[in-house]
Amino acid sequence: MLTVFLGGLLIYGSFDFPLWGDPAAPASIHVSPYYIENTLKDTSVPNIVTAVLADYRGYDTMFETVVIFAAGIACLFLLRTYKTVEPDIQLYRHIPTGITLRIEKGGKFPADSRYFERLDSAWVPYGLIVKTTCRLVIPFIQIFALYVIAHGHYSPGGGFQGGVIMGASLVLFAIAFDLRSAIRRMGERVIMLLATLGVGIYAGFGILSMLLEKNYLDYSVLANLFAFDPASAHSHGILIVEIGVGIVVMAVMVLLYYILASAGKNDEGL
Amino acid sequence: MNWQIELIILAIVIICGISALSVKDLLSAAILFGAYSFMMCLLWAIMGAVDVAFTEASVGAGVSTVLFVAAVYQTSRRTKD
């Protein structure tokens, strides 16, 4: 009832919007022509969306990044449990021979050595085809993610999308192999450091431009630092910022998957 | 121009949304939500917002479906209500 009322209110409010593609809308009269005419001159970036997102509206994008970072930290605080209950039966694999050992409670668990590898307790033998396919596909997905981040100036894409694709490749690895080996390669500490590093790249670049006597996130500082013309300085500034965004988004996506798939224990699951 | 295609996609969006809310199986709801996101992505692309379409395809249809499936894996698959 309340939902229908609120939905009706929103639809009623949307009647006051200008029509889609209306040339007389305020945004089309005042805002858009400036960007369309000056983006290439100011930033030498053909994709206007990227230029608006990362340069003209750099504050918005920075706080979007901070929101994603804060969401990751909130999920970590809410869902992560540090109390680990070891199951009675643990499975280990002897790596040189490939034999799986099943050790019940009271038995002696092998210490962390390079000959024994801990397996999930709900372990099923994964198919060779899935593993091999993922091993082949994952590098290409990661290359595509880097391409999306770096080529966001010229084609659709940018830090957010590229970061998500990069995170998705790591999630694919965690699904195709198991969560334990994914966490062994890229632990929680590394992920949080990466997320902080990404926000740090973005915000630190703004502080750098303040230290060099420009406005916060004014990318033309690069023109003074290196011998760029101002337009390509903006272009390179956008690239730096997009890399920061991509690192944050990748780290938060992987962190969310780890927490959700293992019910907060970050050891085994899915 | 292509208003028939738009109409069909819009209908599929609405059907996917309503059925994702009403279906009892949580895993089907997650997959229906993925289909919803993909159809929304097509709509964004038709309207010319390619960046938004790209984001919708990667975040909505890709990663969030995986996160939903991972969350359903930890609970029971059927809802009570």
Image (cartoon, grey):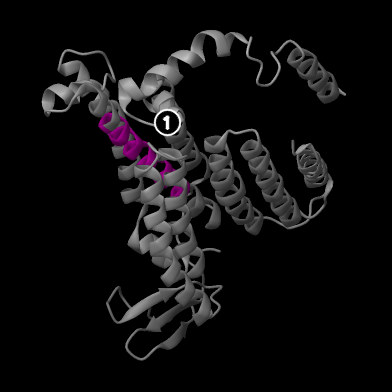
**Residue A266, visible in the rendered structure:** no
Tell me the residue at 26%/24% (across/down).
A231
Viewport quadrant of the N terminus of chain A: top right
Percent position (x, y) of residue A119? Answer: 45, 74
User: What amino acid is labelled 1 in the image?
Assistant: Thr
- Please report the bounds of the magenta region as a residue range: A236-255
Question: Is residue A27 rendered to the left or right of residue A220?
Answer: right
Can you say whether A178 is above or below A231 in the image? below
Q: Look at mark 1 in the image and give the residue it sits on.
A: A50
Regarding mark 1 in the picture, which secondary structure is present there? Answer: helix
Question: Is residue B21 rendered to the left or right of residue B56?
Answer: right
- Residue A151 found in image quarter: top left
Quick one: label 1, few (<14), some, or many (20+) residues within 10 Å?
many
Percent position (x, y) of residue B42? Answer: 66, 43
Tell me the residue at 43%/26% (across/down).
A53
Question: Is residue A48 rendered to the left or right of residue B78?
Answer: left
